[in-house]
Image (cartoon, helix red, strand yellow):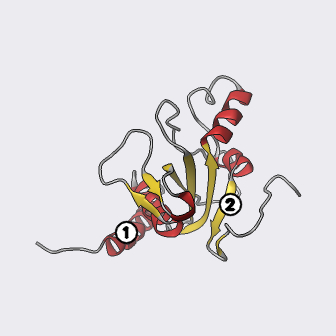
Amino acid sequence: MTVYAVDKLIAQARQLAADYKRVTGKPLAGVSAEVAEYDAARLLDLELCRERTAGYDAIGRGPRAGLRVQIKGRAIFDERKGGQRIGQLKLEQEWDLLVLVLLDERFEPTEIYEADRATVEEDLAARGGGRSRRGAMSVGRFRNLARLVWTRERGPEEDEIWDNRSA
């Protein structure tokens, strides 16, 4: 049996997903979620849960030590198109921090945002019923209420004060 390094497998998954999307016009199901979890863990110093746990995908280390982190990923193929949604939020489960990894057309990370549970729940409650009640949120909405913590150009953003509500 051949042993593969996870980073090499993720690189192959990125390439396969990008090729599949280019040829078929459809995303390859599940790839962005797995890639996003891997990237979030690597870039934000998180430890992925070995077993699937209800509500969260990783436990924080370093500045996020002990926090239970729910990770969402979204590949953005056309920035001009609005309305992209992040996956269903597990509001009935236990978690402390929500992380959104945005991926480009090659399934490489471009930005990572995070928001604590209270911020997410307050926003969903303020918007009332419908999709909000079911824990659905658009990428744009999450970017407005979350904090940018990593970019491809600059790396970690944690040392700076960043306000996404001004301008």
Residue 161, by quadrant, is bottom right
- Residue 93 location, x and y as percent? 46, 34
Asked if 48 appears above or below 119 in the picture, the reply is below
The answer to whether 49 appears left or right of 21 in the picture is: left
The quadrant of the image that shows the N terminus is bottom left
Secondary element under disc 1, as helix, strand or loop, is: helix
Marks 2/1: CA–CA distance: 24 Å
Density class for disc 1 (Cα within 10 Å; few <14, some 14-19, many ≥20) is: some
The type of residue carrying mark 2 is: Leu
Which residue shows up at 67% across the image and 66% down it? Answer: 158
The type of residue carrying mark 1 is: Ile
Asked if 57 appears above or below 9 in the picture, the reply is above
- Residue 137 location, x and y as percent? 62, 39
The answer to whether 77 appears left or right of 106 in the picture is: right
Count of residue discs: 2
- Residue 69 location, x and y as percent? 50, 50
Q: Which residue corresponds to mark 1? A: 10
Which mark sits nearer the N-terminus, 2 or 1?
1
Which residue shows up at 68% across the image and 60% down it? Answer: 148
Q: Which residue corresponds to mark 2? A: 148
